[in-house]
Image (cartoon, helix red, strand yellow):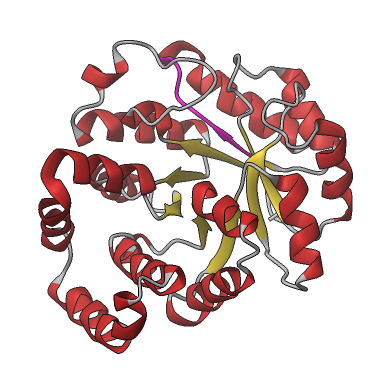
Amino acid sequence: MNASPPQVVLGTANLTGNRLVGRDSPVDFVERFQAPMEIASVFNDAAAAGVDAVATLNQLDVLAALKKTRQTFPNLRVYPIIPNVIGYVREATDYGLVGAARRRIQQMALVDLLKIGIRGALKAPGVLKRDFNTLMSILFDVELASFKSLKPPVVFLHPQITDLALAFGNRSLFELYVRTMRERFHTEPGLATNNLGWLVPKLKEWNLPIPFLLTPFNPSGFLMKPSRAECEALLASSSSAVIADKVDATADPGEDTWRYLRARNIRAAIIEFWNDKSFAPTIKQAKGLLAG
């Protein structure tokens, strides 16, 4: 990605109430972004200001908004982050396990249900044994069925799953993920992680090149683990293209943020929507300075 034009990617955490760390979202966001139309208005403004892509979990209102915005801005790319761990937990809490499963099924096209059903039947022994990798492979199918019409060029494995698999040394899950994304979904695999300092050395040890990494990278070192210095050193030795996350987690990013990333050959970053006034200027500044 570093060889392509600079990218500003819009995150959706503030639009969906999924912000977990750093700055608190404005209190009116929960009420403001209840309908896809309101979310689509932010996507439209973002695309008009120069945002290249939207990175999002599998959420109905966001996907509906994206499909609406793509009618006006067909070149706006979509980067899924799968699986939507938080969403599954919320739905299971609100509707029960059976109710949550029913809601997911109702959202899927019949042809996708049939394909997933056939693959699931072939994997029945692994499902019955609650094999983690088997269950994850089914989740990949379920999640990406929702994104099929958006034709994502890159799909990121959710950081909770990436870091869990990393902690257990689950090389086979990463291999499964790469293979599934390329062979079944014809897209490039990416990994989102909050532990870059441990992930990059392990990928090298496994001889498993990953083209795209989504990870915290910012001048303050916020959530750069184990340290900013170690992450910077690993970046210099990695062949992966990095999309910087958490650039605005503690404050609005300024020129120093974009110059910091540009100096380290990072040409892509995720920003969140914080307010109407600074939104477009932030996007334009990022695009200009990341280009160097």
The residue at 31%/18% (across/down) is 29
Residue 258, x across and y down, in percent:
73, 28
Q: Position of residue 260 (x, y in %)?
A: 81, 29
In this rendering, position of residue 132 left or right of residue 290: left
Residue 92 in the image: above or below residue 25: below
What is the count of numbered marks? 0
Residue in the foreground of this view, choosing between 193 and 94: 94
| Residue 86 appears left or right of 175 | left
**147 sits left or right of 170 in the view:** left
The outermost residue toward the bottom is 122
| Residue 6 in view, yes or no | no
Report the side of 205 relative to 129 (left or right). right
* Picture residue at 59% right of the left edge, 23% below the top: 248
Residue at figure coordinates x 73%, y 69% from the top left: 209
Q: Residue furthest front?
A: 129
Question: The N terminus lies in which quarter of the figure?
Answer: bottom right
Span shown in magenta: 269-275
Residue 111 in the image: state x and y as whole percent.
Answer: 18, 78
Q: Quadrant of residue 46?
A: top left
- Identify whether 164 is placed above or below 203: above
- Residue 54 visible? The answer is yes
Which of the 4 image quadrants contains residue 247?
top right
Specify whether residue 290 is painted magenta.
no
Point 88% across, 49% down: residue = 236
Q: Position of residue 96 (x, y in %)?
A: 14, 47
Where does the C terminus fall, quadrant-wise? top right
In the foreground, 253 or 24: 24
Question: Which image quadrant is residue 184 in?
Answer: bottom left
Instruction: Please tell me which residue lies in front, 212 or 133.
Output: 133
